[in-house]
Image (cartoon, rainbow, N blue to C red):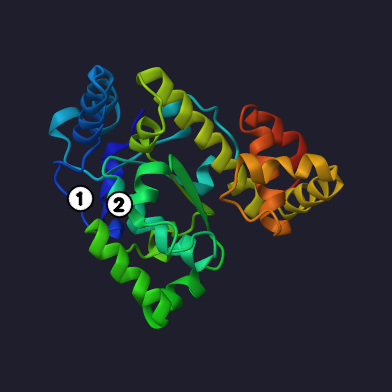
Amino acid sequence: MLKRGVLFGVLLFLGSARAAGKSDFLSLCTQTMEERGESAGFCKQFAQKFFGGAKAKNAVTIISPVDVGAPKMSVDPKVQYVIFNDPNYLVGVAYCYFVFRGWVDTTKVTPDSIALSSSGFSILNEDITAYQKWITSDNAGQSCRALVEKESGVPTTNLAQVLGGHAAFIGLNPLASVKNGHIGFDEIHDDLRLTMNHERIHAFQVLCPTLEAWGQQMWKELAPEEQAKFPVVYPSYNWKDLKVAGREYVAFSFETKPLKISEHVGKCKLR
């Protein structure tokens, strides 16, 4: 069941719920399909399920993994899950954090490109205090804020407030799924389920140090020719960083079978 009744707190932190218009999923999905000369019927079906259809008023909807067909897992109570009706708000939440962590180069990846290409992301509750200081006090952080606000028309999000006591914030972006070639309700639904499974594994990693260590060891033991395949298929990640490589290797390995990750979490208490 979709938890639309508890949206206020998250929307307050994200800035405000911008009224549905040309930047909402239904409008942008319909426009995309019409430009391709293809049926846009599924856009309405998807928007109705997650956003309230053509009368949608909110930029995001709080969801549970089961809403996209993902299984329930023990980490779920420790994660805040949302789906973006307006992809500009994804930028407000995630773009500058990715820049801060060194995952995005502002000279190569623009806020708009993130909004149109990223079907989802996770922000883990680590380095958040340093990030909030960077975005308010550092020249690079202030420049990033200005870039987001100019290009996307939304404020950057206070991640400390959004995360609260959660271990992670996971956001899904159905418009990017459409832009990436997934056509039809079921295709988008399946793509977002895979994204949900992938990003949720990262929440396990930040909560369970033994799982994190296991992933890094598995990556180091992987044959060099096998390691070399990952940067080719997934070039946006820094595979030279052991922490990144270990996390992504495990997430990609288990995203189609997320329940199997519990075998490797073992007796780890999700702190």
Residue 165: x %, y % from top left:
48, 58
Q: Residue 139: x percent and y percent?
A: 40, 82
> Which residue: 26% across, 64% down?
149
Image quadrant occupied by the C terminus:
bottom right
Q: How many marks?
A: 2
In the rendered view, tell whether residue 32 sits above or below residue 97.
above
For image coordinates 62% across by 39% down, the residue present is 233
Q: Is residue 26 left or right of residue 73?
A: left
Tell me the residue that label 2 is attached to: 89
Q: Residues within 10 Å of mark 1 (few under 14, many from 20)?
A: some
Residue 229: quarter of image? top right
Residue carrying label 1? 17
Q: Residues within 10 Å of mark 2 (few under 14, many from 20)?
A: many
Q: Secondary structure at mark 2?
A: helix
The answer to whether residue 271 is visible is: no
Kindly report the distance in space between the C-alpha atoms of the residues bearing marks 1 and 2: 10 Å
Provide residue 205's location: percent of width, then percent of height.
66, 50
In the rendered view, would you say 160 is above or below 65?
Answer: below
The amino acid pointed to by label 1 is Ala
Asked if one can make out residue 10 in the rendered structure from this viewpoint, the answer is yes
SS at mark 1 in the image: loop
Q: Nearer the viewer, residue 223 or 216?
A: 223
